[in-house]
């Protein structure tokens, strides 16, 4: 009960600190909200690209052309043992030839096509690992897969990730500076009170915690604002407009590029509160000497 | 209650206290006197663990303050009442809330806070001005609020660092008499001062410091003004 009362008083002190900070509150919250919006956008974009590559990759098939000396179903059984493999479909040379004859007016010649396996992988990044393994099998003469597109998308995603980390890092550093200055001003305005509390035997927790909570409050509000911005973009820009445009431009593109928006928000909220509280803890540790 | 064993304290090679040995018993009332620079404030800061001695040991209630960790310092200070020359009151807070602040910060139940603050304000005879802000109070009244705040947690030791430094002689005497009454209830009271009028009027134990050394310790003493005059003449001659 006593601890609860102390916590209650700490919240009162936190509220008074926020009230004392005036317009500085909005400066801190704005900068942190911008940093978190950029971070959230990058996070969403990279998650979308990752999902896209995975979706595409899992639909993508490695075509393995077999030597005539081997029984295709036996080879298919061997290939399906690889952990990366989700599905193996056998296209015998006769079936392939019949299909070809139906769609193309081919001359009456003997069937030149090989037996083929269509191997579907679990995830896109497994394509590059699996294809060389298949190639080593004596039954398989050649493999083909549309790797370049996946590779490019992954390279782009990697670039976005690095750029996002750099920009978010720079903005977080700026935010920490502004949080530090704001809380430093509050500490200066409460210097006498802090000195009295310290001399009267009030514990470090009670004296320093309001500043940590004040930082956490900034992080919480900034993350909420950033989430509102991202949610608005998601609902009114990305979903209705961009996906429609994408569908008309590239119909082969997977339309349901799902990413977990709740997960993005949870990460943003955690990061915002952690940066804010960390800034408060660092500043109070540096400027309050008890 | 208060014990100093071979305590010395220096600042950058300049000694502020030299080999002090002292004992103040439970419930005792004593003045710590001496001219400016004698080491009174240094000794007070050692007692509430604002500083640590360069050598020797300081004990309060048997606890060696040298061995306290930073986390234990607040626990020590809760057992001490401290009264300051400049009162150190929160200007935008009423007398009642100034006294109540520490109790609330320690998580004391609000009903108990009201009871204990009223009792402390009653001891210093300020119950009627509980809702007044510091700027509405005289210097003596502000110091009484400071004393109420120092005793509200029932500390066994009360340290008063030049408590009458900003007050007129009549009010100073009132304040010291109030501290004496508090001592009669069993609290150890140590007052640092260079106000010879109040020391002479009270005729209580007088511990005299000069140049960082303990020069006299008398049970029912007076302030040796000769010591101050000597110090002033020494200061003047060093200027010349």
Image: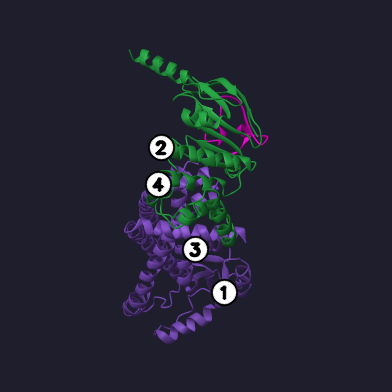
Chain colours: A purple, B green
Task: Determine the chain carrying the residue at label 2.
Answer: B
Give the Cα separation between the discs numbered 2 and 1: 97 Å
Task: Please tell me which residue lies in front, B71 or A136.
Answer: B71
Q: Position of residue A102 (x, y in %)?
A: 43, 87
Q: Residue furthest right?
A: B62
Q: Residues within 10 Å of mark 4 (few under 14, many from 20)?
A: few
Residue at 39% across, 77% down: A252
Q: Earlier in the sequence, mark 3 or mark 1?
A: 1
The residue that appears at 33% across and 56% down in the rendered structure is A24
Q: Which residue is mark 1?
A: A87
Depth check: give the residue in front, B14 or A34: B14
Question: Is B50 one of the magenta-colored residues?
Answer: yes
Q: Quadrant of the N terminus of chain B?
A: top right
Residue labelled with disc 4: B138
Q: Which residue is mark 3?
A: A125
Which numbered disc flags the more N-terminal residue, 2 or 4?
Answer: 4
In this view of the protein, can residue B39 be seen by the observer?
yes
Instruction: Identify the residue at horizontal 52%, vertical 54% (top origin).
Output: B100
Chain for disc number 4: B
Task: Give coordinates of residue B73: x percent, y percent.
Answer: 58, 41
Q: Which part of the image, by quadrant, shows the C terminus of chain B?
A: top left
Residue depicted at x 57% and y 44%: B74
Element marked by disc 3: helix
Number of residues whose C-alpha sits closer than 10 Å to that of mark 2, classed few (under 14), some (14–19) or many (20 or more): few
Q: In front: A220, or A242? A: A220
Query: Which corner quadrant of the image does residue B23 belong to?
Result: top right
User: Going by the image, does A238 lie left or right of A204?
Assistant: left
Task: Specify start and end residues of the magenta stretch as a single range.
Answer: B46-69
- Depth check, mark 2 against mark 1: the one in front is 2
């Amino acid at each position: 009960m006593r601890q609860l009362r102390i916590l209650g008083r700490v919240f009162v002190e936190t509220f008074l600190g926020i009230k004392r900070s005036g317009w500085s509150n909005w400066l801190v919250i704005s900068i942190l909200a911008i940093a978190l919006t950029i971070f959230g956008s990058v996070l969403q974009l990279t998650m979308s690209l990752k999902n896209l590559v995975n979706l595409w990759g899992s639909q993508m098939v490695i075509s393995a052309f077999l030597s005539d000396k081997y029984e295709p179903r036996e080879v298919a059984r061997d290939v399906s043992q690889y952990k990366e493999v989700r599905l193996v479909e056998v296209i015998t040379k006769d079936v392939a030839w019949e299909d070809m004859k139906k769609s193309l007016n081919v001359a009456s010649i003997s069937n030149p096509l090989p037996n083929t396996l269509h191997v579907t992988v679990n995830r896109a990044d497994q394509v590059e690992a699996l294809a060389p393994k298949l190639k080593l099998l004596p039954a398989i003469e050649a493999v083909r897969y549309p790797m370049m597109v996946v590779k490019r998308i992954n390279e782009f995603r990697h670039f976005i990730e690095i750029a996002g980390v750099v920009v978010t890092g720079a903005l977080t550093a700026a935010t920490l500076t502004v949080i530090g200055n704001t809380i430093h001003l509050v500490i200066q305005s409460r210097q006498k009170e802090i000195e009295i509390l310290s001399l009267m035997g009030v514990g470090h927790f009670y004296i320093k915690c309001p500043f940590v909570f004040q930082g956490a409050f900034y992080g919480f509000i900034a993350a909420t604002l950033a989430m509102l911005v991202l949610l608005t973009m998601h609902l009114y820009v990305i979903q209705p407009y961009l996906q429609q445009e994408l569908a008309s431009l590239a119909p082969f593109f997977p339309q349901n590029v799902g990413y977990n928006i709740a997960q993005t928000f949870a990460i943003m909220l955690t990061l915002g509160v952690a940066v804010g509280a960390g800034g408060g803890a660092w500043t109070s540790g540096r400027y309050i000497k008890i | 209650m208060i014990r100093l064993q071979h305590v010395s304290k220096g600042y950058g090679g300049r000694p502020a206290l030299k080999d002090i040995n002292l004992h103040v018993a439970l419930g005792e009332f004593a003045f710590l006197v001496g001219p400016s620079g004698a080491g009174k404030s240094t000794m007070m800061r050692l007692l509430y663990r604002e500083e640590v001695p360069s050598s020797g040991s300081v004990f309060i209630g048997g606890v060696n303050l040298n061995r306290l960790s930073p986390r234990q310092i607040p626990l020590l200070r809760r057992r001490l009442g401290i009264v300051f020359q400049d009162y150190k009151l929160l200007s935008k807070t009423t007398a009642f809330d100034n006294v109540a602040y520490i109790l609330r910060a320690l998580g004391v139940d609000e009903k108990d806070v009201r009871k204990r603050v009223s009792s402390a304000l009653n001891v210093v005879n300020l119950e009627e001005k509980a809702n007044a802000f510091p700027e509405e109070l005289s210097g003596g009244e502000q110091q009484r609020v400071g004393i109420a705040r120092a005793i509200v947690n029932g500390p066994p030791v009360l340290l008063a660092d030049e408590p009458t430094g900003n007050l007129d002689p009549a009010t100073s005497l009132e304040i010291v008499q109030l501290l004496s009454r508090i001592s009669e209830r069993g609290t150890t009271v140590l007052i640092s001062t260079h106000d010879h009028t109040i020391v002479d009027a009270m005729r209580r134990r007088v511990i005299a410091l000069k140049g960082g050394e303990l020069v006299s310790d008398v049970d029912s003493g007076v302030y040796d003004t000769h010591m101050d005059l000597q110090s002033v003449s020494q200061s003047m001659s060093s200027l010349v």
